[in-house]
Amino acid sequence: MDVGAALNAKGTHTNKRSRSSPLSDVQQAEKVSKMDADALKELMSNLLDEKIKVLASKKDVESIKDEISENTSQLQSLRRENVELKEEVQKMKTLREHDQRRLAWLEEQIKKKNIIVRGLQADLEPHAAIKTLCNDVLKIPDPLPLVSVRKLGDREGKMSVLVETINAAVAEDILKRSTMLKGTKISLEKDLNSIKLQQKKVMFELKEQLTAYDKSVKVSVRNEKLKIGNKWFKWNKKKELECKGVKADVVLKELYNENVIENINLIYNELVDLVGLA
């Protein structure tokens, strides 16, 4: 075989290939398309079923609305109750404060007849010591206008004694004679009610603070009042420290420099907590 024949024979063999008929391909495509459409239809149906399951019916919506309305009503009711509770607490607080003032007033009426004597020798018999003090120092003759004498306690060789007189006028007269005790280290004090006693202890705390900052200004406590220089300070009904109706911080600026005033605590309740009287 010559070369040309061989090439023709090779080319004829190379161009031959097996192909499906055009009709077979169309049928196959239709079959696949039909399967895909059925699968898609089933998938969509399943998805739709799932969506329908979670969709709320009209009845469900109405039920939710009712629940919201009920919750709103309950919330409004709780708010009203909260307001009423606050009002009730405030009312009880006011009544409690009124009762405390009333109790303090009654306590004060009883204590007005009493005098506390401090600085007596602890080894003396209380009644004998008071009789000697009244007769020899205070110049009160027998019979002494006293009801009872009771020792309160002693410290560092000195004792304190509670003396009950026959009435408030007698107690006041004896207190006025306290100037006669100058140089004896014995002092006479009012028997204060619980509120004034608390105020007195707070005043001692203030005295310590002021003295710590400036020892050049004389500070003293008498009953529930504080004396700074020649000015007297007391707590008003609002528990504000004042001097003749003027707020304490204003008056204190006349007595101390600004640095001292800024470091002195004049808040009553905080002072009470500080000295442990609450």
Image (spheres, grey):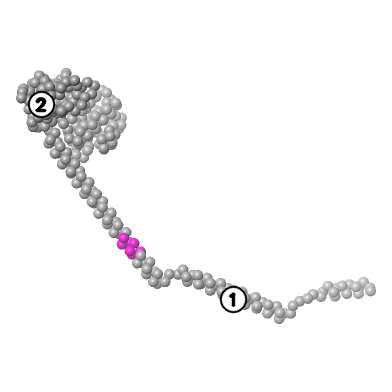
| Circle 2 crowding by C-alpha within 10 Å: few under 14, some 14–19, many from 20 | some
Residue 159 locus on image (x, y percent): 19, 24
Residue 164 locus on image (x, y percent): 12, 30
Give the camera-side residue of 119 and 15: 119
Q: Quarter holding the N terminus?
A: bottom right
Q: Amino acid at mark 1?
A: Asp
**Does residue 1 appear anywhere in the picture?**
yes
- Which residue is identified by label 1? 38
- In the image, is residue 68 above or below residue 221? below
Q: Give the residue at x 22% y 26%.
A: 219
Give the camera-side residue of 235 and 120: 120
Label ID, residue 174: 2
19 left or right of 87? Answer: right
Quadrant in the rendering for residue 147: top left
Q: Give the residue at x 21% y 24%.
A: 154
Label ID, residue 89: none
Q: Quarter holding the C terminus?
A: top left
Magenta range is 68-74
In this view, the mark in front (2 or 1): 2
Could you give the CA–CA distance between mark 2 and mark 1, rounded to whole angstroms? 117 Å
Instruction: Determine the main secondary structure of the stretch shown in magenta.
Output: helix
Quadrant in the rendering for residue 267: top left
- In the image, is residue 105 above or below residue 79? above
**Does residue 185 appear anywhere in the picture?**
no
Q: Amino acid at mark 2?
A: Ile
Determine if the magenta segment contains residue 38: no
SS class of the residue under badge 2?
A: helix
